[in-house]
Amino acid sequence: MLFKHESIETNAALLIVLTLAAISIGGLVEIVPLHFIEGTVEDVKTGDGKDAVRPYTPLEQLGRDVYTREGCYLCHSQMIRPFRDEALRYGHYSLAAESQYDHPFQWGSKRTGPDLARVGGKYSSAWHVKHLTAPRSVVPESIMPNYPWLSENKLDYSDIEAKMATLKAVGVPYSLTDIEYKANVEKFGEAVAKKLDIHKAEKNLMSQAKLGNYDGNPDKLSEMDALVAYLQVLGTMVDFSAHDEAEFVKFR
């Protein structure tokens, strides 16, 4: 057996073939069953029968881009596992539906900092601004770097329509046509459908930023506005108090 193992390791071509075979088999075992499981993604509805989980607004999407650019996912996960200790600290475990419009997913692989899957609404926007600018001013034991430039940098939204169109191409239901807009009205409701209209992306972005005033400076649209808008929506789309505790177990 030892001889055979050594013969594989010393034969580069054979090792490559066997490695690819192992990866292919492992991938198929994980992927193929998903095509035969009904309801892999939970069907979560609001009280009026609309989809609870929606795509990000233009401002939130740009905030997510800043989040990714700054590498926040390297220290913060967005995946609450179905364990009691996680539920006690972070809240209800993460649903597949909650990240169905994420490209790429921000589940993360480690937690140097806390999980952010349900951070939306947990703190005020002013707290987030202070925390991002100087983390130790609000959390003395934090080892998180300072991000003061987020308030200084103007938000570049010149390509927001192109970004939304690209996300639409991979399945995110932003609308370009009247038919797609009406489909979103049926799926999410008119108020949400208006925010998903690519043609009105800049208008919707400016409106949300002005109304939210996330960075505390109404005279400037900054990257901080976008990032805080993104953080404040995480985990807020599904109202778990309106659902039975065991309702989502059948999807696991």
Image (cartoon, rainbow, N blue to C red):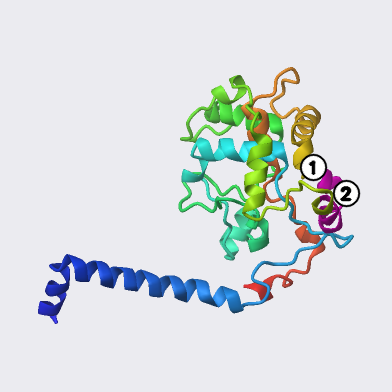
Horizontal and vertical percent position of residue 24: 39, 71
Q: Magenta span: helix, strand or loop, mainly?
A: helix
SS at badge 2: helix
- Where, quadrant-wise, is the C terminus in this rendering? bottom right
Q: Which mark is residue 195?
A: 1
Label 1 vs label 2: CA separation? 9 Å
Residue drawn at (72%, 20%) of the image: 217
Q: Is residue 48 left or right of residue 205?
A: right
Residue type (three-letter) at the residue carrying disc 2: Glu
Query: Does dot 1 land on a helix, a strand or a loop?
Result: helix
Residue at x-position 64% and y-position 36%: 62
Horizontal and vertical percent for residue 185?
A: 86, 53
Q: Circle 2 is placed at which residue position? A: 190
> Does residue 172 appear in this view?
yes
The three-letter amino acid code for the residue at tag 1 is: Lys
Magenta region, residue range: 181-194
Q: Nearer the viewer, residue 32 or 238?
A: 32
* Magenta region includes residue 190: yes
Is any part of residue 123 visible from this angle? Answer: no
Which residue is found at the position 79% from the left and 27% from the top? 210
